[in-house]
């Protein structure tokens, strides 16, 4: 049973890793990620100009003072990449 499970898992992972090669890449360079790359001042300007709810603006301000990865994570989560 364990041997069969290992074989199925290995085969599945091999197929998955090959399939990933054919998935289109996400295009980078939207206004939010550009603001993240521009630093804290750029991100502050982006958050100030947002036409969003208070909760989204609060998340934006929190992301702007976090790491670059946290900032870009906010952008991707909102679909603003």
Image (cartoon, grey):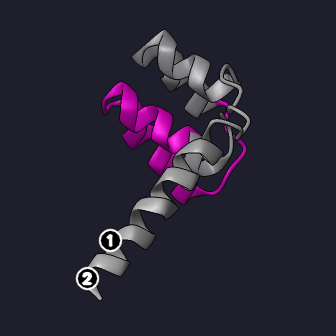
Residue drawn 68% across the image and 23% down it: 31
Identify the disc placed on residue 2: 2
Mark 2 Cα within 10 Å, few/some/many (few <14, many 20+)? few
User: x and y percent of residue 49 in the render?
Assistant: 67, 31
Do the numbered discs 1 and 2 sit on residues whose CB atoms are within 8 Å?
A: yes
User: x and y percent of residue 76 in the render?
Assistant: 58, 42
Residue drawn 50% across the image and 10% down it: 38
User: x and y percent of residue 32 in the render?
Assistant: 62, 28
Mark 1 Cα within 10 Å, few/some/many (few <14, many 20+)? few
User: Is residue 55 on the magenta stretch?
Assistant: yes
Instruction: Tell me the magenta residue range.
Output: 49-75
Q: Is residue 71 above or below residue 56?
A: above
User: Is residue 39 on the magenta stretch?
Assistant: no
Between 21 and 56, the one lying in front of the other is 21
Give the secondary structure at mark 2: helix
Quadrant of the rendering where the N terminus is positioned: bottom left
Residue topped by disc 1:
6
Could you tell me how many numbered marks the image carries? Answer: 2
Assign the magenta stretch its main secondary structure: helix
Identify the disc placed on residue 67: none
Quadrant of the rendering where the C terminus is positioned: top right
User: x and y percent of residue 80 in the render?
Assistant: 68, 38
């Amino acid at each position: 049973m364990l041997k069969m499970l290992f074989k199925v898992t290995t085969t599945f992972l091999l197929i998955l890793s090959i399939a990933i090669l054919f998935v289109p890449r996400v295009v980078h360079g939207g206004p939010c990620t550009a603001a993240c790359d521009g630093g804290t001042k750029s991100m502050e300007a982006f958050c100030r100009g947002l036409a969003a709810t208070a909760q989204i603006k609060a998340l934006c301000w929190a992301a702007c003072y976090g790491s670059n990865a946290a900032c870009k994570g906010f952008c991707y989560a909102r679909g603003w990449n």
